[in-house]
Structures are given as C-alpha cells and as structure tokens.
Image: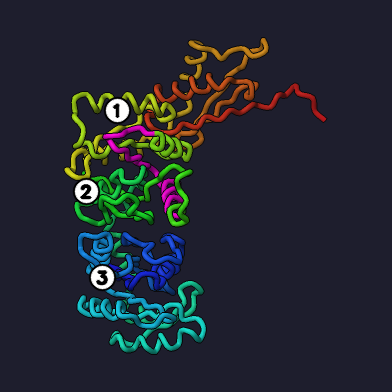
Amino acid sequence: MSLTVAIVGRPNVGKSTLFNRLVGKRLALVDDRPGVTRDRREGDGQLGHLEFRVIDTAGLEEAKAESLEGRMRAQTEAAIGEADVLLFMIDARAGVTPTDRAFADLARRSGRHTILVANKSEGRASEAGTLEAYSLGLGEPVPVSAEHGEGMGDLFRALNECFPDDPGDEAEEEAEEEGGVRPIRVAVLGRPNAGKSTLINALLGEERLLVGPEAGITRDSIAVDVERAGVKLKVFDTAGMRKRARVEDKLEKLSVADGLRAAKFAEVVVVLMDATHPFEEQDLRIADLVVREGRALVVALSKSDLVKEGGFATRMREEADHWLPQAKGMPVVLVSGLTGAGLERLVHAIQSAHEVWNRRVATNPLNRWLSETVDTHPPPAVSGRRIKLRYITQPKSRPPSFVLFCSRADALPESYLRYLTNGLRTAFNLPGVPIRLTLREKDNPYAEKD
C-alpha cells in the first residue's frame, strides 16, 4: 500500500494550493477568503519519484459538533485517522496563532508522523514566523511557498524519510491485486439541496461527504470510489447549480465551473431532482447540458420517501420522455439517501446507461435499416428535387455517432433528421444517450473543375 498524506491546519494557510501543486492539477478551489474547502478531497500526489495519496482537508476550527464548522472539523479528523503522514501547515507570515497551538496538540495526539510546513515563506516577512514554529514541538519546520513552488526539495526530503525502502514494488503489487478493472466515472449534478451528498454517502455506507440542511455546502467536486452490486464506480459529488442570473458570488461561480468540468470528464451523469418538485426549469437546463456534452444520462428522483408511490414512478417516466425528448428512454430511478431505497436500481441503471453509451452497431444492419426507413418515409423533395440518402455508418461510440452520406445535405429538413435519430434510437435500442448524426455529401464527379 502507498502512503496516505493529509494536509491539515487552520483556515486560509494554503492547504488547497499545496494540494494542487502535489497532484499537478488545479483540482481544489482556491480563494483568498478562509473556509473555501469543506469536504475532504483526495488525489494522486507526486513529488520527485515519490507517489502517494494526498488528502486536502477543511481548515480546523473550534466549533460545536452540530454546526457546519463542527461537521467540517469531523471530516478533517476522519482524514487524520486515515492518514499515515500529516503535513501540518501554518502561515509563516502570520506566525503561530493560538489556533495553530491547539491543533498542533491534536496532531500530536493522533500518533501520526507529522511534518511541520511553514507556508508563504517567500521573502523576509516570513522569517520570524518560521522561527516561531519551533515552539509547536513538531520538529524542524519546512519552509515552502506553495503558490510559487519554493521549498519543494526540502519537503521531498522530509517526505522521503516516511516511505518504505522500495515503494515502487508495493505500488505494482497493488495494481496487480486490483485486476485492472476501470470504474465507471459518474458525476452527480443537480440544484442546491437536492440531496447529492446524502445520496453518495448512502452509496458508500458512511458519512464521507459533508451534509446538512444548509443549501450550498458542497463547493469542490469531490471524487469517491464506490463498489456496489459488483459494479465499480468513481462518483463525483458536485456543487448545486442555480440559475446563472442568481450566481453572483465569485466562489459559487468557481464551484459551478468545477461541477461542469466534472460532467465533461464523466461517462455517465446522474441528474438528481427533488421528487417533491421534479422537472423544474433548472433541472431541465442541467439535463440538456449533459446531453449536449455527449454524456449518458440517468435521472434520479431523490427524497422519494416523501411522495406517495401510487403511479408516481410511471408518471415520472412519462414526464421525463415529455420534457427531455433529446434523451428519450433514459433511466428514471426513485431513490432516497435517507432510507437507502432504490440504490441498487440506481447502480444498475448507471451500468446499463454506460453500456448503451459504448454500444456500436455494424454497418450492414444500419444500411438495411436506412433502406427500410427511406422506403417507408422518404425525405421530402426540396425545390422540386429529391434528396438521396445513400449510406450510413457508425465511426465511433461514446456517445453513438453516425455519418450519413447523402445528396444536398444542407437541404435536409431538421424534422427529418429528428425522425432518423428517433428511428436509430428505437431500432438499435439506444435509450437515454445522445445520438450524433452528421451529414456528408459525396463529391460530384460531374461538377465543374478548374
């Protein structure tokens, strides 16, 4: 097993900036204000030849357990419990604060190997704070600047002492044990307070993500590994998406952008709607965005324990096809993160949508279908001239994409294109996924040549 490294400290000392540098990507949201990070975020870190799992945590604060800050602290304490090594970070320019001292005691009591990191150490203004850090009793501080990449060599040497003699062999053994089965990448999108984090916690069977009655708790897109009913998933929890006109705060804009990025890199997107108010305008906007991005779509109706069952599921199935014809036949699943109802059905729906998204159709059946379709309902003549549909093929999947060779591609009506798309969906069992249909004209050998 490779080492797990947790970055801990009070708010606004630069934990997320160091996390982004270690993973080599801007995964965690960063802003000047304190308390941006709330959930713990995990990534694959690398420093020199060292490879490890790194956890970004919420800033440690003294607060009551039932408050939002108290629940954030509980998440950080859970990360400390998982970690092999703690990077305890302070702000060298601000010096050691009473909060730093309180949480240095927490780090010591955890029994984890702790490396004291004095961040923001660029320039002379940080020298006094770095020297003061010795008073925490956590050994020699490692001065770094996470923003500018200074001091990474010193941090490498401090981390290197924590590794076994040959970490590479262990990583290879671990990869062999996992069997190489790649999980399905799933993003969960929805309006604020739809129950996204609660649903993912229910799938995991633990309180991994921060939840509560307050809307907008989730900010970063947090990835967690789930295995349920024999299906491996990598699930991304995202921030709630409100109407663009209502989003004014810079941090909320960053959170929404992070969620959109998660959707672009997902294979299946679960659009989570509140069963008590389903198919609101914003729900439909989010679902349409998913289809335009070319992802497989699953509609999940959360808080289903609050609605009466009698015919509700059937009605929601009809509503989904009515409001989202561009992904007709998508799975619609009633779930409850509170009671755990519908979770197995949701996982099977995700697996089914992923299979359809990857489906390929052979060329011979496609052209037989095209011939029968044109015989039954030929394309309309435009300006007195017929449009000839000659040949169709599927060059790629993910999502299923088809190329139709024809004459006068620019004259084929949009309504007939929809007719062909719906025919492909029905004939080859492609429910709930976007279908790309591109028109191509063959060169006219009798056209005038220069």
Q: In this view, does 278 lie to the left or right of 31?
A: left
Instruction: Return the residue found at the far left.
Output: 339
Q: Which of marks 2 and 1 is nearer the N terminus?
A: 2
Q: Where is residue 386 in the image (x, y as percent from the top left)?
A: 63, 13
Whether residue 265 sits left or right of residue 116 in the image: it is right
* Residue type, label 2: Ala
* Quadrant hosting residue 297: top left
Question: Mark 2, mark 1: which one is toward the viewer?
Answer: 1
Q: Mark 3 points at which residue?
A: 62
Q: Which residue does the image show at 64% across and 24% down from the upper left?
A: 410
Q: In which quarter of the image is the C terminus?
A: top right
Q: Name the residue under label 2.
A: 202
Residue at the outermost right position: 450
| Residue denoted by label 1 | 316
Q: Can residue 162 be seen in this view?
A: no
Q: Nearer the viewer, residue 67 or 440?
A: 67
**Where's residue 304, x and y in %?**
22, 36
Helix, strand or loop at disc 3? Answer: loop
In the image, what residue type sits under mark 3? Answer: Glu
Q: Residue 219 location in percent, x, y? A: 37, 55
| Label 1 Cα crowd, 10 Å radius (few <14 / some 14-19 / many 20+) | some
